[in-house]
Image (cartoon, helix red, strand yellow):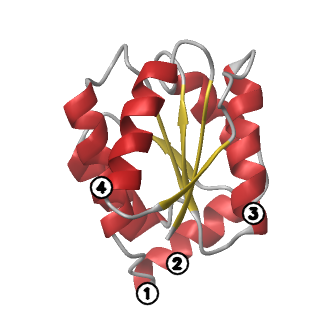
Amino acid sequence: MRVVISSDTEGMPLKETVKQALIADGYEVVDYAEVPAADCIDSALAVAHDLLEHEDSLGFAFDGYGVGSYMAATRVKGMVAANISDERSAYMTREHNNARMICMGPNVVGTEVAKKIAREFLAADYAGGRHQIRVDMLNKMA
């Protein structure tokens, strides 16, 4: 699976940790932040726009708390993103909300939890069915 990541300066160490874990797990990782983005907005938008062009991909954006990236990503029409700090929520936001992108930061989650969040999110499949109503409602709002 193709996974897209990016980060601002504050999120870089956590992004690198998650990136290396994903590569070790066999994922194809596209990194928009070999050099950190100047701002979390730019970082999140790079991931969100890429995901809209590559429907089979999922992504992660990192900043201090994940909140700035989340706010930017959800402003992109058609993007469902979540600000996550635990692995169960990561799995469920993919399964029930068809989230394509997780936003998180090192001021909230540590490295081991971040790796678990990434793995759970990528392991989940969108369930569709009754959950599609919610996704359609979100997409109409954008």
Q: How far apart are marks 2 and 1 (CA)?
A: 6 Å
Disc nearer the start of the sequence (3/4): 3
Which residue is pictured at 44% across the width and 75% down the height?
A: 131
Mark 2: which amino acid? Gln
Mark 1: which amino acid? Gly
Mark 3: which amino acid? Leu
Check disc 4: other Cα within 10 Å, few if <14, some if 14-19, many if 20+: some
Mark 4: which amino acid? Arg
Disc nearer the start of the sequence (4/1): 4
Q: How far apart are marks 3 and 4 (CA)?
A: 21 Å
Q: Nearer the viewer, mark 4 or mark 2?
A: 4
Q: Name the residue under label 3.
A: 52
Q: Mark 1 points at which residue?
A: 129
Q: Do the residues labelled 2 and 3 touch (CB within 8 Å)?
A: no
Which residue is pictured at 27% across the width and 28% down the height?
A: 111
Residue 90 visible in rendering = yes
Q: On the rendered structure, is 69 left or right of 66?
A: right
Q: Do the residues labelled 2 and 1 touch (CB within 8 Å)?
A: yes
Q: How far apart are marks 4 and 2 (CA)?
A: 23 Å
x, y (%) of residue 72? 70, 33
Q: Mark 4 points at which residue?
A: 119
x, y (%) of residue 75? 75, 41
Q: Mark 2 points at which residue?
A: 132
Disc nearer the start of the sequence (4/2): 4
Which residue is pictured at 31% across the width and 59% down the height?
A: 25
